[in-house]
């Protein structure tokens, strides 16, 4: 292999590791989520090997409500690794350097939100970031850098790409697992059918993925906002904004040519919903066939049960299934049927499966499914899209020894 992992790191070193603990924050409270659980594996291994560990991570972006310190993150991570994690309210000033100097074997500190420094956010090449004060100050304090922030690896930010040029660099467990599973569609050949669930609200992303993978995927199961845009393109009266929610019109204008191109050149790969679900006058789930839909009457928030059954069947008979986006607004139980039935079919089958997207993957725990029944459940958003479309991830590239993983 041409990249080093924790297996190559040895023990008893001074280690700087970049994680991605970026989390939902509501009214100042940071929500525990699977990013903590995943990175806990890397951090726990570093602790068990007796390394002195300093962690770098970010939260939100300047100007947003989610831009908060990492104090709560330290407590949540400590719970996950069952070991103290000391929050240091400084990233690379004297307070941080003191905390790093006094680390003992197996001790862990979490440095302040790295996006609170001016160095982090400019998108720059690794060579330039390696000259930043952040990198030049912290790098000499450590023996090794462990890159684990796969879900931030699409960003050319200082703590993601700057350190590996100056230090011995290794991929953490999250980095290596995510990279291998998410790149599978671009790098692996499958003998049987390859299916992609193409749903959710971020139609522009999904349609880009579909366009890139059109020769690799046999069935695109269309749902969510994406599904309605495709239905609109073939003449059904759906996929227009109601109550100015702006999910449809701007994405329709931005993508209608790519949609038309896919319909013209890959018609047999596109699987359309045959029925849709909405909330009726009594606020209960009701269904109509697509031939009967009248967009002005309802918001269509899930695929109907005939569609769910057909999609579940296709997924169950595929050799590989990649999920990008939910088939409906599953957070509301009335509209969870399509998403849950297809995920269930994947979980119960033995296909190679990757479920991505922060929102979509939440359905797995919300509806009592077991992550272990999927080949991989990604914690990445933008980086997952890059992987699906075969675009290189700068935070991954810098960890490679010879330019090839
Ligand atoms: N018809 C629909 N109308 C409105 N929302 C929908 C509809 N179908 C699916 N959704 C929403 O789509 C969301 C999931 O897809 P979305 O594209 O937003 O994100 P994702 O792919 O999970 O990834 P990430 O948030 O990481 O970018 C769910 O929260 C679901 O409520
Ligand atoms: O949460 C994420 O997707 C990553 O941490 C990247 O965050 P960003 O989109 O604010 O750069």
Image (cartoon, grey):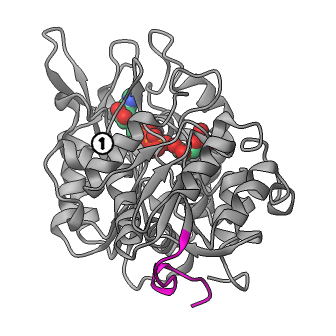
* Quarter of the displayed picture in which ligand 2 can be seen: top right
Q: Is residue 330 above or below residue 195?
A: above
Is residue 224 one of those drawn in magenta? no
Q: Is residue 5 above or below residue 257?
A: below
Place of residue 263 in the rendered image (x, y in percent of width and height, measured from the top left)? 56, 51
Q: Residue at x 82, y 51 (%)?
A: 132
Q: Residue at x 40, y 73 (%)?
A: 50
Left or right position of 236 against 63: left
Between residue 383 and residue 321, name the one nearer to us: 383
Place of residue 24 in the rendered image (x, y in percent of width and height, measured from the top left)? 41, 33
**Is residue 273 visible in the rendered structure shown here?**
no
Place of residue 83 in the rendered image (x, y in percent of width and height, measured from the top left)? 29, 56
Please provide the residue range marked out in magenta: 1-14
Quadrant of the rendered image containing residue 76:
top left
Between residue 401 and residue 117, name the one nearer to us: 117
Between residue 2 and residue 84, name the one nearer to us: 84
The quarter of the image holding the C terminus is: bottom right
Left or right position of 164 against 362: right
Q: Residue at x 66, y 30 (%)?
A: 253
Q: In what element is the residue under mark 1?
A: loop
Q: Which residue is mark 1?
A: 274
Q: Is residue 266 above or below residue 99?
A: below
């Amino acid at each position: 292999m041409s990249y080093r992992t924790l297996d190559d790191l040895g023990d008893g070193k001074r280690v700087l590791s970049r994680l991605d603990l970026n989390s939902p924050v509501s009214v100042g409270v940071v929500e525990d989520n699977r990013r903590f659980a995943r990175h806990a594996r890397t951090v726990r291994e570093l602790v068990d090997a007796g390394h002195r560990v300093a962690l770098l991570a970010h939260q939100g972006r300047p100007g947003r409500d989610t831009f908060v310190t990492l104090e709560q993150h330290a407590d949540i991570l400590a719970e996950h690794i069952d070991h103290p994690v000391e929050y240091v309210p400084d990233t690379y000033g004297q307070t941080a350097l003191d905390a790093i100097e006094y680390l003992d074997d197996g001790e862990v500190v979490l440095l302040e939100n790295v996006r609170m420094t001016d160095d982090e956010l400019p998108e720059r090449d690794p060579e330039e970031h390696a000259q930043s004060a952040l990198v030049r100050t912290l790098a000499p304090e450590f023996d090794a850098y462990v890159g684990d922030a796969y879900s931030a690896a699409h960003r050319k930010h200082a703590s993601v790409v700057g350190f590996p040029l100056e230090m011995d660099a290794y991929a953490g467990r999250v980095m290596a697992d995510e990279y291998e599973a998410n790149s599978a569609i671009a790098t692996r050949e499958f003998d049987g059918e390859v299916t992609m669930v193409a749903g959710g609200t971020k139609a522009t992303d999904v349609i880009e993925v579909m366009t890139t993978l059109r020769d690799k995927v046999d069935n695109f199961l269309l749902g969510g906002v994406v599904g309605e845009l495709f239905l609109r393109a073939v003449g059904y009266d759906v996929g227009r904004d109601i109550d100015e929610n702006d999910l449809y019109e701007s994405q329709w204008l931005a993508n209608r040519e790519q949609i038309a191109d896919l319909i013209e050149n890959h018609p047999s790969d596109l699987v359309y919903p045959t029925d849709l679900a909405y909330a009726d006058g009594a606020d209960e789930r009701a269904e109509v066939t697509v031939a009967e839909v009248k967009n002005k009457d309802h918001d269509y928030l899930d695929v109907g049960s005939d569609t769910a059954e057909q999609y579940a069947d296709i997924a169950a008979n595929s050799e590989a299934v990649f999920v990008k986006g939910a088939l409906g607004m599953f957070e509301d139980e009335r509209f969870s049927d399509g998403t849950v039935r297809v995920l269930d079919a994947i979980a119960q089958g033995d296909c190679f499966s990757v479920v991505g997207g922060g929102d979509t993957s939440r359905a797995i725990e919300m509806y009592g499914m077991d992550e272990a029944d999927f080949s991989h459940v990604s914690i990445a958003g933008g980086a997952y899209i890059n992987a699906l479309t075969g675009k290189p991830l700068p935070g991954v590239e810098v960890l490679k020894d010879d330019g090839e993983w």
